[in-house]
Amino acid sequence: MTPGEPTRQDSPSRLIDARIQELDDWRGQTLAHLRALIRQAVPDVVEEWKWRGVPVWSHHGVICTGETYQRVVKLTFLKGASLSDPSGLFNASLEGHARRAIDVHEGDAVDEEAFKALIRAAAALNRAPVR
């Protein structure tokens, strides 16, 4: 392990910082930008690090995960099928009964206001009484 390399004992926020820094390309920039929008939308969001290295944002339950792949940054909303998406941000995992995802490719522009509205809606859904 090199100095400054994150350990399992590091906070989830620091682990996410390290992931963004290690990517050092458009994926890291995109993940950092989406993370900032999530924090703007729900200022008291909780950052977590789950499933052996997946950034997770929660507020009374998981809002979304942020995974990075070679050609895409994927934000998966665990309860996405229950969310209204009038701006059509969801473009992946559309066949599932529960989750929906947003795949962001290099050069894609994200509708920031629509994204923040979707984040707020996911947080509100987590607070809603179970029926």
Image: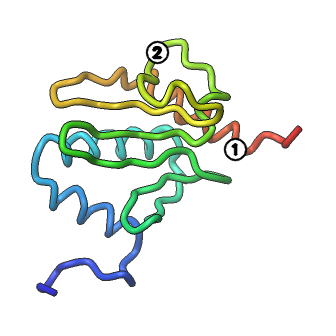
Q: Quadrant of the C terminus?
A: top right
Q: Which mark is residue 126?
A: 1
Distance Cα–Cα, label 1 vs label 2: 21 Å
| x and y, in percent, of residue 121 in the image | 62, 31
Q: Residue at (19%, 37%) from the top-left corner?
A: 71
Q: Secondary structure at mark 1?
A: helix
Q: Say whether residue 68 is left or right of residue 82.
A: left
Q: Residue at (63%, 38%) from the top-left corner?
A: 79
Q: Say whether residue 7 is left or right of residue 97.
A: left
Crowding around mark 1 (Cα neighbors within 10 Å: few <14, some 14 to 19, many 20+) is some
Depth check, front residue: 128 or 101: 101
| x and y, in percent, of residue 31 in the image | 28, 45
Who comes first in sequence, dot 1 or dot 2? 2
Picture quadrant of residue 81: top right
- Position of 74 relative to 6 (above/below): above
Q: Which residue is mark 2?
A: 88
Q: Say whether residue 115 is left or right of residue 6.
A: right
Q: Which amino acid type is shown beneath numbered disc 2? A: Gly
- Of badges 1 and 2, the one in the foreground is 2
- Position of 44 relative to 31 (above/below): below
| x and y, in percent, of residue 12 in the image | 41, 68
Q: Secondary structure at mark 2?
A: loop
